[in-house]
Image (cartoon, grey):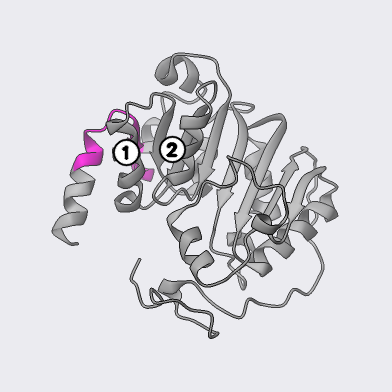
Amino acid sequence: MGKNKLKKFDDLQGYPHVFQYPFAQLKEKGFAMKGQWGKSFFKNDNPIVLELGCGKGEYAVGLARRFPQKNFIGVDIKGARMWSGAKQALEENIKNVAFLRTNIELIDHFFEPGEVAEIWITFPDPQMKKVRKRLTSTRFMQLYGHILSPGGIIHLKSDSPFMYTYTCEMVKANGFPVEIATDDLYHSGIADDILEIKTFYEQQWLERGMNIKYIRFVFQPRELFVEPDVDIPYDTYRSFNRGKRSGKQSSQENTTI
């Protein structure tokens, strides 16, 4: 591990708004603030919004600036990336944002049922060959159902035609009410101040001339979730750090992320 990453990890240890819990510690002691985020950390009872796979935390920080009446938590396992958003929030003294370093599969260990009002999923790996790893799969819907409040909102913002199509089909198969769905956000006329927050990765997709997809739907709990039974063409490209499949590229194509 490089010195820069080590410094970032050291910094995170001292950030009061960053929570890091190895699985062994979580299994042994649990998470004391579960169900108490508002009371113990944010010191209010405002709605809690998660950004899953937050990367550098651009959305979590950007939303926190725009909505002081809500609390935001960026969740990711990669601390060196999370450090950017955490540092920015600290420098700007943004009190309604925190960061949680953990695997998303463990999210229900940190939140009580109904404790979360909204979930943002921003530019996830589409996991085209592994349905159980897709962050909008029915497996994850079951997981989100453990922490979302009634009528909780889920947002997906993605460059991936595969991920967007899969999510739309999953939503349709399970009858979730759709509030917005577009496969070309910035030419749809619906992009607003919130949706125009751009992550590090989104900037790169836009430089490659790619359309951004967005869907917002209302989660409804159910006993049985239905996986969509449809054939979806794979994307013809891959992210920068997973190689490329097409000629869609920019001068940053070989940048290591």
The answer to whether 9 appears left or right of 218 in the picture is left
- Foreground pick, 150 / 254: 254
Q: Residue furthest left?
A: 3
- The residue under the point 48% across, 71% down is 239
Going by the numbered disc 2, the residue's amino acid type is Val
Mark 2 lies on residue: 61
Earlier along the polypeptide chain: callout 1 or callout 2?
A: 2
> Quarter holding the C terminus?
bottom left
Asked whether the viewer can see residue 82, the reply is yes
Q: Secondary structure at mark 2?
A: helix
Question: Could you say which disc has been placed on residue 88 in the image?
Answer: 1
Rendered image quadrant of residue 169: bottom right
Q: CA distance from mark 1 to mark 2?
A: 8 Å
Q: What residue is shown at x 63% (from left), y 42% (from top)?
A: 192
Say which residue appears at 44% left-offset and 14% top-offset: 43
Q: Amino acid at mark 1?
A: Gln
Q: Note whether 135 is above or below 162 in the view shown.
A: above
- Characterize the local packing of mark 2: few (<14), some (14-19) or many (20 or more) Cα atoms within 10 angstroms: many
Front residue of this view, candidates 178 and 252? 252
Answer whether residue 135 is visible to the viewer in this image: no
- Residue displayed at 38% across by 73% down: 252
Horizontal and vertical percent for residue 103?
Answer: 45, 49
Magenta segment includes 23 = yes
118 up-or-down from 96: above or below: below
CB atoms at circles 1 and 2 under 8 Å apart?
Answer: yes
Q: Which residues are magenta?
A: 11-25
